[in-house]
Image: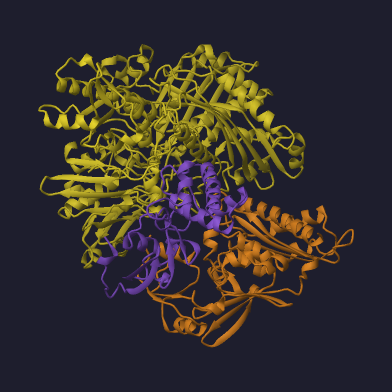
């Protein structure tokens, strides 16, 4: 069921795109209607991009596009031609965890884990904008992501722990 | 929830975009795609062509002159919400922008796209209506301007032709000098990313903020989701004009709003409840705007 | 087709830890999830896999006149189309939760709820599948939809003609002299309460990959279903195969379930059928969110309660009469016993003897109900605490005092309920007193949320604050035998003896590997509860090794015996018993193996710290050594062990009545004392929970971090249920909440700071003293929020008699004042 199997048919036009995903060049011939979320998962094999609602609410599909946090289910892959995508798979270096990922683990900020990629990306975006966010700022910035398991309490702890770790790394 | 097939176009100028709009049949414009993508995923819309206007740089700007606030159609909600010049001088706009959906959606959603969608529950249309704004539209015939109160015709139906593209939203500054104006945008939104049940855009200009009882010279109110189009009620505005803001006037303004709106009932918000919200949020909007004007 | 947990980086455990149980050991599940490596069912796509989609009806009730699939079938990209008739030609219907009913996986003749699948399509990918679905033309003859459960009972229009009624199940149970109690009491209050249709809505929707094997004439089905070793009959029966020919497995990672994925067998069945029709091509189905919300077989309790409470002028409760109608939708599934679980906590923490419990299970043209965290107890506690509030207010008594004087006293523990279940331990009066003391001291003081000056100032602004103190029981460790009460002949139950009770033990097995790893296998599935971590802790302690020496894997439905599994707050207790037994078996086996190898008596060798030594200290065999020895020997593998842990109270006579009479058996009573502080804006009706205090006790905490995480999550779901979430239907049977814009899941903006404290009152009935937990928070959250709202709105004499307590409902009551 990969995008490779879709050949151009008269009623299914395709076009070529080239972009960078987690630092690697990716070129593909795909239908314009293919969502970025499906493209990243099925063509680039990045299952860390999770799909929970496909209508822009749950945030499980959150990635970074040209430096902006976006919901990949709300973008078509063709729109990213020439652009740069970062997903959770692109965060850690040499198989080790990024400080944010470590913090989520240490603070038990994940249970089923389905929302976690989205929260990690949102946390990264938050801490880049504000390395020491207030509770209010955290709540506002993370309000685009839904978690059904944790009740958010430990996620706040993870953000704070991540902030401390990243400050120490600087 | 996968859309039907379409061909994809990415013009780089307004001229290219409107030419495509004219030449292609069954074409939709795509800006932020935060609403369009859903409609297409549900196949409630299945255009043969998508014209992605995100590469048209000239459409992204926030310009202020002494008379006007001019916002390009492709300006993102996030940028409007964060604009220092708007926060200082035209607060209703960034406040409206900052309350749309959640932060991630605001990175992509645009003012032109939102207005183009013309949902009566949208944040910008009621600001446009309240502040007597106008829209600039482009087509292969050139550009034209439409006043906000001529633009919204019926439920999600507007003046715009199928071959036209919104290029800018403009708001007159002249009635609202920043030093003696207060503006606000508020309402009920039960969850961070859902549609508001009802919202109100409000502005108040006073004669002299320094005096002990500043008099309301001009008041504006625009309501979202209180009717099938964004609603401005002038009788609500005049109810507080001509005197310092007092409880009696506020009550009166609220009562008129209650009577004058024609909201549609929805799950967890029937018609009567929406009238109550219209009343209450009108009062709060005026109170907040006045307090800011005199501060 | 069970999946291995990859043995990759873990945070190294402290080698000098004395025990791992009782510590908040960081989870082993996390690394793979955080790096994106975790494989949920949506990520699994075998070679040559095809995609399946479903055409779902938009009518609530209609006859199918014709289905024209020709335009779809003609399309070159179409691999398969099946309709209900195609399914009926070769397969069986799916079993329901009641014997009198069955259900076709694709609708035949009549559709009975919006979203009911009518046809399936298979093609290369979901995009083209949806193109093909658009090409199918269905002609319907619409009928009146039955949407009001109260009037549905009159049986004027039937959801299922052949059933002859819309009330296929009901029961009226009377414990003690109820009528007399109500006659004698000084007061009787009668009130109605509504619990809206609410459900779990996990972030991950249902998904399945099914593959038919032509050679062996069997099926391999991978699905994120819950309780796969219990409910596999809902799949092999419709397929028409034996259990051993339908291998159902669940990936180690499931994106949340909370009970809702117990009844997603329809998708497994259809994907398996499709694969068989396609000569064994793997077929994958991923439910999208709209399908899930609308007709995804995942709604839950939907009740109208009529509660009666008999009480004297001094506030002592004399009797309880519970009556409710439960709107089950068009098809009652296995979780039908959700209507009965409340019997396990029928009087909550109160000492009340005469109790009546009367329910009707009503059919309507709506989506089926499934299990949701709490399994019917949450609406029950809400209704009970609401009528208690109403009684207290009626008497002019402080609800705290009213409650306190009716609580079961510690000297009454273990306490047998009128409905035969037994509470094991707990001091409820003390818990209630303690939560009040905590909140009053923290929040009535200066700067606190309930400081009198602040409360008054807020009132002037139209904002009314309130807090209420309540104690709730979270029943744990359900027995399995009682769960088919509604499929049993209830008249014959009185003749049953303990030998007739068919409890299902918890199965656990393990084997030693060449490198000394102890690979352990669960016979159930997980969806975020951290079972792998828990088993590692438990077994590490039992075997005196490190958690990192253990790997935890899952069995499929063929490998595993039928068992209850991960539901009903069972696993902490069942796994501790199972690991204890398994550990002892392993130790015994390895000692045997070593003794045989050294040719000595077994009592001259001892297992210690992961190895076996001769008591004279001359020799020692490591696990690696023992593996080699076992491989060279003949006969049964001694490096393999399994254990079946029986339900912990099967041998306790006091539970005999509940077991034999098929009343809910839940031997552990975890409990919580809650005090949510709410603020109601009386002009708009908007409600905010400012802070949530909760004292929680689940006995011995095996992993306190996991326990607390579960409580946070449960309380968040409780807040969502109390204030935000509802699957409404309009009069024509159209669902109103089919996107997340309408079914509102709480975000960071809706959930306040939670102040949780934990105590440990061990259970006398379980090996470790642990009590079942996991459903807590959802079970008790809504009831406590409702009573807090009542308190806040006391000046207006309003009670929150409808869940969710939405702003318009609050305003309606205020308006009517």
Q: Nearer the viewer, residue C291 or B100?
A: B100
Colour given to chain A in the rendered image: purple
Q: At x 81% / y 56%, what residue is drawn?
A: B249
Q: Nearer the viewer, residue A100 or A156?
A: A100
Colour given to chain B in the rendered image: orange
Corner quadrant of residue C146: top left
With B228 as the anchor, is C478 left or right in this view? left
Number of dots carrying numbers: 0
Whether C170 is drawn above or below B37: the answer is above
Q: Position of residue C297 (x, y in %)?
A: 36, 44
Question: Farthest bottom residue?
Answer: B141
Q: Position of residue A109 (x, y in %)?
A: 48, 43
Whether A35 is drawn above or below C579: the answer is below
Q: Nearer the viewer, residue C815 or C418?
A: C418
With B33 as the anchor, is B145 left or right in this view? right
Question: Farthest front residue?
Answer: C618
Q: At x 34% / y 21%, what residue is drawn?
A: C662
With C560 as the anchor, is C150 left or right in this view? right
Q: Position of residue B269 (x, y in %)?
A: 58, 51
Corner quadrant of residue B236: bottom right
Corner quadrant of residue C313: top right
Q: Nearer the viewer, residue C586 or C746?
A: C586
Colour given to chain C in the rendered image: yellow
Asked whether the viewer can see residue C810, the reply is: yes
Whether B38 is drawn above or below C200: the answer is below
Identify the image's colour scheme: rainbow, by chain, secondary structure or one colour: by chain
Q: Position of residue B69 (x, y in %)?
A: 68, 74
Question: Farthest right residue?
Answer: B212
Screen quadrant of the N terminus of chain B: bottom left
Asked whether the viewer can see residue C747, the reply is: no
């Amino acid at each position: 069921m990969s995008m490779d199997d879709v050949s151009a048919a008269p009623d299914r036009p395709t076009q070529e795109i080239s972009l960078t995903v987690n630092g690697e060049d990716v070129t593909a011939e795909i239908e314009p209607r293919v969502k970025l979320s499906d493209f990243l998962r099925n063509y680039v094999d990045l299952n860390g991009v999770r799909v929970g609602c496909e209508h822009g609410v749950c945030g499980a599909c959150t990635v970074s596009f040209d430096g902006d946090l976006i919901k990949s289910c709300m973008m078509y892959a063709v729109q990213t031609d020439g652009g740069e995508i970062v997903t959770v798979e692109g965060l850690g270096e040499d198989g080790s965890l990024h400080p944010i990922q470590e913090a989520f683990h240490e603070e038990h900020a994940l249970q089923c884990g389905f929302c976690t990629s989205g929260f990690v990306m949102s946390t990264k975006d938050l801490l880049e904008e504000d390395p020491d966010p207030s509770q209010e700022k955290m709540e506002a910035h993370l309000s685009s992501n839904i978690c059904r398991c944790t009740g958010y309490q430990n996620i706040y702890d993870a953000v704070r722990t991540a902030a401390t770790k990243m400050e120490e790394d600087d | 929830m996968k859309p039907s097939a379409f061909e994809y176009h990415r013009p780089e100028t307004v001229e290219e975009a409107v030419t495509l709009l004219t030449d292609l049949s069954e074409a939709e414009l795509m800006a932020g795609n935060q609403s369009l993508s859903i409609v297409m995923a549900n196949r409630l819309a299945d255009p043969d062509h998508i014209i992605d206007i995100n590469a048209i740089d000239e459409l992204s700007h926030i310009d202020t002159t002494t008379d006007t606030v001019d916002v390009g159609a492709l300006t993102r909600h996030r940028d409007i919400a964060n604009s220092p010049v708007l926060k200082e001088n035209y607060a209703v706009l960034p406040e409206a922008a900052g309350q749309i959906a959640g932060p991630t959606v605001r990175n992509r959603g645009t003012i032109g796209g939102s207005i183009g969608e013309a949902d009566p529950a949208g944040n910008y249309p009621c600001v446009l209506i309240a502040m007597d704004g106008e829209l600039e539209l482009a087509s292969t015939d050139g550009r034209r301007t439409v006043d906000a109160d001529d633009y919204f015709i019926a439920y999600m139906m507007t003046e715009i032709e199928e071959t036209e593209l919104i290029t800018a939203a403009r708001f007159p500054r002249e009635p609202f000098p920043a030093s003696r104006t207060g503006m606000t945008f508020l309402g009920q939104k039960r969850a961070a990313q859902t549609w508001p049940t009802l919202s109100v855009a409000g502005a108040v200009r006073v004669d002299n903020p320094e005096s002990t009882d500043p008099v309301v010279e001009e008041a504006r109110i625009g309501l979202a989701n209180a009717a099938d189009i964004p609603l401005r009620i002038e009788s609500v505005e005049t109810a507080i004009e001509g005197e310092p803001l007092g409880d009696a006037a506020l009550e009166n303004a609220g009562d008129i709003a209650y009577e004058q709106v024609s909201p549609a009932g929805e799950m967890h918000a029937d018609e009567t409840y929406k009238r109550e919200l219209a009343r209450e949020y009108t009062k709060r909007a005026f109170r907040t705007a006045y307090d800011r004007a005199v501060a | 087709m069970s999946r291995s947990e990859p043995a990759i980086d873990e945070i190294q455990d402290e080698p000098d830890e004395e025990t791992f149980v009782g510590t908040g050991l960081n989870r082993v599940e996390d690394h793979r999830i955080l790096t994106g490596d975790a494989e949920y069912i949506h990520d699994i796509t075998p070679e040559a896999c095809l995609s399946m989609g479903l055409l779902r009806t938009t009518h609530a009730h209609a006859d199918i006149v014709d289905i024209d699939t020709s335009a779809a079938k003609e399309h070159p990209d179409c691999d398969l189309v099946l309709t209900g008739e195609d399914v009926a030609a070769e397969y069986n219907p799916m079993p329901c939760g009641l014997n009198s009913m069955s259900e076709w996986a694709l609708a035949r003749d009549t559709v009975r709820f919006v979203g009911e699948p009518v046809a399936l399509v298979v093609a290369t990918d979901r995009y083209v599948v949806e193109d093909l679905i658009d090409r199918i033309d269905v002609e319907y003859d619409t009928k009146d939809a039955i949407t009001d459960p109260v009037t549905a009972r009159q049986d004027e229009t039937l959801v299922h003609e052949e059933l002859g009624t819309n009330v296929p199940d009901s029961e009226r149970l009377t414990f003690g002299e109820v009528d007399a109690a109500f006659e004698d009491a000084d007061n009787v209050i009668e009130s109605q309460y509504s619990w809206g249709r609410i459900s779990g809505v996990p972030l991950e929707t249902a998904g399945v990959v099914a593959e038919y094997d032509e050679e062996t004439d069997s099926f391999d089905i991978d699905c994120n279903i819950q309780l796969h070793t219990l409910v596999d009959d809902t799949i092999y029966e419709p397929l028409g195969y034996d259990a051993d020919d339908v291998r159902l497995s669940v990936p180690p990672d499931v994106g949340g379930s909370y009970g809702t994925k117990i009844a997603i067998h329809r998708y497994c069945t259809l994907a398996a059928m499709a694969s068989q029709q396609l000569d064994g091509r793997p077929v994958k189905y991923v439910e999208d969110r709209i399908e899930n919300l609308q007709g995804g077989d995942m709604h839950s309790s939907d009740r109208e309660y009529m509660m009666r409470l008999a009480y004297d002028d001094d506030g002592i409760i004399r009797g309880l009469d519970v009556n409710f109608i439960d709107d089950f939708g068009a098809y009652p599934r296995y979780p039908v016993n959700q209507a009965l679980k409340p019997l396990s906590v029928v009087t909550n923490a109160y000492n009340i003897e005469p109790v009546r419990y009367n329910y009707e299970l009503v059919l309507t043209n709506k989506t089926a109900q499934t299990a949701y965290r709490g399994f019917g107890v949450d609406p029950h506690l809400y209704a009970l605490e609401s009528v208690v509030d109403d009684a207290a207010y009626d008497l002019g008594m402080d609800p705290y005092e009213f409650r306190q004087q009716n609580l079961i006293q510690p000297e009454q523990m273990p306490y047998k309920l009128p409905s035969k279940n037994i509470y094991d331990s707990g001091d409820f009066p003390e818990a209630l007193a303690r939560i009040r003391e905590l909140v009053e001291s923290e929040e009535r003081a200066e700067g606190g949320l309930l400081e009198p000056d602040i409360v008054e100032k807020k009132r002037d602004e139209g904002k009314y604050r309130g807090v209420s103190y309540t104690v709730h029981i979270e029943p744990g460790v359900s027995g399995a035998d009682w769960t088919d009460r509604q499929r049993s002949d209830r008249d014959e139950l009185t003749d049953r003896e303990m030998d007739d009770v068919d409890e299902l033990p918890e199965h656990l097995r393990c084997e030693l590997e060449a490198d000394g790893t102890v690979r352990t296998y669960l016979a159930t599935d997980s969806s975020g509860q951290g079972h792998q971590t828990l088993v590692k802790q438990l077994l590490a302690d039992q075997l005196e090794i490190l958690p990192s020496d253990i790997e935890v894997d899952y069995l499929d439905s063929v490998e595993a015996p039928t068992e209850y599994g991960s539901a009903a707050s069972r696993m902490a207790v069942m796994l501790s018993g199972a690991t204890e037994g398994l550990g002892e078996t392993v130790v015994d086996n390895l000692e045997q193996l070593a003794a045989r190898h050294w040719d000595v008596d077994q009592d001259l060798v001892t297992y210690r710290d992961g190895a076996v030594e001769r008591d004279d200290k001359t020799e020692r065999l490591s696990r690696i050594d023992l593996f080699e020895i076992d491989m060279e020997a003949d006969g049964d593998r001694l490096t393999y062990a399994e254990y079946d842990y029986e339900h912990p109270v099967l041998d306790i006579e006091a539970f005999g009545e509940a077991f034999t009479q098929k009343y809910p058996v839940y031997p552990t009573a975890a409990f919580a004392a809650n005090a949510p502080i709410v603020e109601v804006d009386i002009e708009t009706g908007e409600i905010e929970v400012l802070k949530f205090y909760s004292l929680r006790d689940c006995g011995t905490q095996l992993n306190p971090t996991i326990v607390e995480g579960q409580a946070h999550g449960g309380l968040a779901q409780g807040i969502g249920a109390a204030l935000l979430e509802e699957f409404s239907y309009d009069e024509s049977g159209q669902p109103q909440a089919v996107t997340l814009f309408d079914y509102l899941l709480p975000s960071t903006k809706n959930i306040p700071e939670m102040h949780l404290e934990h105590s440990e009152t061990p259970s006398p009935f379980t090996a470790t003293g642990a009590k079942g937990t996991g459903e807590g928070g959802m079970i008790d959250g809504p009831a406590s929020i409702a009573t807090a709202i009542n308190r806040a709105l006391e000046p207006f004499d309003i009670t929150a008699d409808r869940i969710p307590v939405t702003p318009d409902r609050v305003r309606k009551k205020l308006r009517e004042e």
